[in-house]
Image (spheres, rainbow, N blue to C red):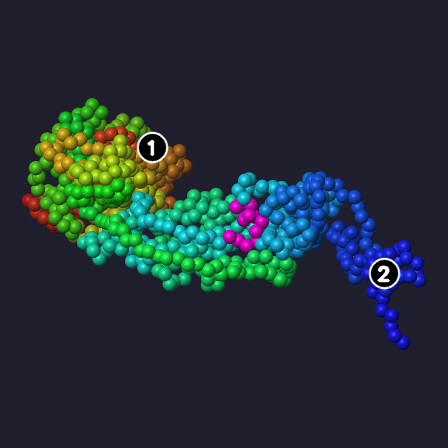
Amino acid sequence: MPIDKRIPRVLNSDLDNKAVDKVSMLDALNLYSGPDNDGFSVDGKKSDAGDQVLKNIKGNVKVSEQEALPANARLIGAVEDPKTDITYLFIYSTQASGNGVWAYDRYGRLPGSQENSLRLIYKSKQFNFPPNGFVKADIVYTNAIQTFPDLGVDFDKDAIIYFTDGKNEPRKINAYRAFEAGSNIHGSDVYAEADFITACPKTPVKPITFSFGFDGSRSTSNFTTTPGFQFAYQYVYIDGMESSISPYSDVAFPPSVVFQGSEPFANHNNYNVCNLAIPEPGPEISSVKLLARQGSTGSFLIIDEIEKEDFDGSYAFHNDRIGTGISENEVNKQFDSVPRKAVTQGISSNRLMYGNYTDGFDAVKTQCTAEVIYKEAPESFLSYDVNVTPSIEPIGAAAVNLGKSVGFVLDFSEMPSELAEGVELSLSVTIAPDRNWHAYTFKNTNNVAASFHQTRQLGPQIQEGINNAYDNVNLQQSLAETNVEAGAESSFLPSIFGDGNGIATNTSWNTVDTTGNDGFDSLGVSDVTAYGTSAANPVILKGGAVTFFAKIKTTQEISSNTQQKINQAFKKALLNQETEEGFEVLEVQSSDSYNLDVGLYSGKRIKQDQIFQSVSTTSPESRLICAVKTMEGGAQTRPPGGFFIVNKANVEIELKEVAYDNYPFVPSTSNHFRLNLKSINAPEIYTCIHATTEFNGVLHPLDWISISREDLIEIEQGATSIEGWLASKGFDPDLKFHQNPVFAGSNNAINIISNTTGKQIGYLKSLTPFDLSEGVCLMDGEGGPGGGPSNSSDSSANSYDYWRLYNQGSITVNPTSTGGSFD
């Protein structure tokens, strides 16, 4: 029997039962077999009860339009978010600006929503939906951003809607960020908005550019043996997507490496930073990944990721970072494979796939004629010699003679005779003492010479060779001062102290304990507190390098007196004076600082040799001990009453101008610069104490002992005593700190010396104990106490070298060892 197949497709309730055709039906009931999301379990969670059970589809419910649909709106697609029960509707409007995405918020989950409300997510004329089209959409979730952290676990990840309409390129939108904006998320910037609504991340098309320069905070270069670097970058979007990698930069070599073979001396330290210029990202970018590789064939590494708020388009690369790897597939990916348009899409295993798509572009036939036009290339990265000579420069005018400090002379006589407009010139000078920095004053507050210098020499100190330790600077030179001018015949000699407070501020040496007899007047604040009063009693700072640099650029062609003009341009730049005509200053650093850290701790032993000891065991810290004057004595010998070391500080040194009336002649292509100790910031001071002996002929302990300010204050407050503190640090509690080891003289002199030596268990009361007003002499400690030999080691030409006092540290307190005779 034949089967009469009926496939009802059309509802037609007006027909008679006998007239119903095979595709019509008189009645119909819409059924649903999916889960019933209206149900809740006992713990308050949604229940999927009723899944796979046929049930009637519910009727319509009136929707509250909190944001009204545009005129002539037409629904052309929808997608439901199963986590939040929000249905996103794609609306076409005859008004271009009315095209957009709305949300049917069934349960009022979005901020400010009511139940069964219609909310605007985002509208833009860039959507350009087709009037009779269909939008296929899917939802994924991103961990990169959480727009609504206060709305519970269902909003812990932002919902990203990917959709396509078969006409425009595939799109995506962050539903929650879009909801907050409504439209024009980036104002009138249509390109930034396109970045926000487009599925394909925009590939960067501009490479990184670079230039090498000098970073004054670094004293060395890490590009000395580099095979070059190539750079690239990658954008990371706010929604978590990552772009393809940008085009690669040219291979970056510092000029000193490029021209190393043609120059007699390659100063790599002049190019210790590679300044990268990275194209500015758009508003949709949250960070920029910076990639680099050595040479042009190595593997790329991620050397940094710069947050958008910290990004200014520049990056200082010092070649001092350890990079992290990046996959070869990521490096080789030139763009994200998103079609020009697609009719449908689907998501599986968190991967987005498009169907029935159009990809690629038709080839465009082109025809052109090329002609090479040759132009003369300007010279670039040329190096010229600037002679730098160390010097000792006067402070102030010749008639004032406030003292002198180390400095240097720059000679530009070998610079070119002509410069074109737009030429950049850079100069850097790095200076460090051979030993340590020594600071002291030469004149007192009444502008009267009250001290003596480390040397009589003045002016440029021509070096014979880099390995010559003395360079004949001990010989008489034409600019050398007389003994009187240098203070060598001062009425205060043989005392190491001059007159005045030196570089001491209004502070006091406060003795907190003594091992002397009860009759000794040692405790409390001293009547006099002075240090940094002479070259024999300087404030000593652990040495560190400082760098001064300047970069200038010609603003016009310079064809006459070029060396002189370059000389003046650099002088004015380094001294922060008015810019020389024909030049502009691009960069300048006329002061620099470094952090010193000696590494002391309370109770540390500091070794010191005996006089004339042949094998030195003196600790480096012994060369940093400063003496404190606590008693007036004129030319009479008075021992210091206290000792200290600057353990930590930030030391700032600046360049100062030199008065040329101190010199008979200065070439027009040269300039003198003086170093000035500008500040000693946040100093941490440790007191140093040295044990004595009660009996002649009995050798006292040779070591110094460091003790912190905090421990001394505890002794002062009675929490412990010096004997208790010594025992706690493992020292003999019976050590004495109040008598001179060997002395022959009147009882009064012995008492004075004993009382003075007995003051050493104390500290400087002020936390800012240094006065660095104009007139502070700054010298290399190699030529002062705690420095090196004055002429040559073991020389009998003078007693300082013969007795090897250069191995005694900065304060000589220990007796002689066996042997030795004085001529």
- Image height of 7 relative to 289, above or below: below
Residue 414 shows up from this direction:
yes
- Image height of 670 relative to 52, above or below: above
State the residue in front, 64 or 390: 64
Locate residue 681 relative to residue 22 in the image: left or right. left
- Taking the magenta stretch, the answer to whether it contains residue 287 is no
Q: Quadrant of the N terminus?
A: bottom right
Residue 326: image x %, image y %? 46, 60
Q: Are marks 1 and 2 in contact (CB under 8 Å)?
A: no
Q: Amino acid at mark 2?
A: Ser
Locate residue 559 relative to residue 328 in the image: left or right. left
> Mark 1 Cα within 10 Å, few/some/many (few <14, many 20+)?
some
User: Outermost residue toward the top?
Assistant: 446
Residue stretch in magenta: 191-202
- Taking the magenta stretch, the answer to whether it contains residue 196 is yes
Q: Which mark is residue 768?
A: 1
Which label's residue is closer to the chain start, 1 or 2? Answer: 2
Q: Amino acid at mark 1?
A: Thr
The residue that label 2 is drawn on is: 24
Residue 409 shows up from this direction:
no
Residue 237: image x %, image y %? 53, 50
Q: Element at badge 1?
A: loop
Q: Element at badge 2?
A: strand
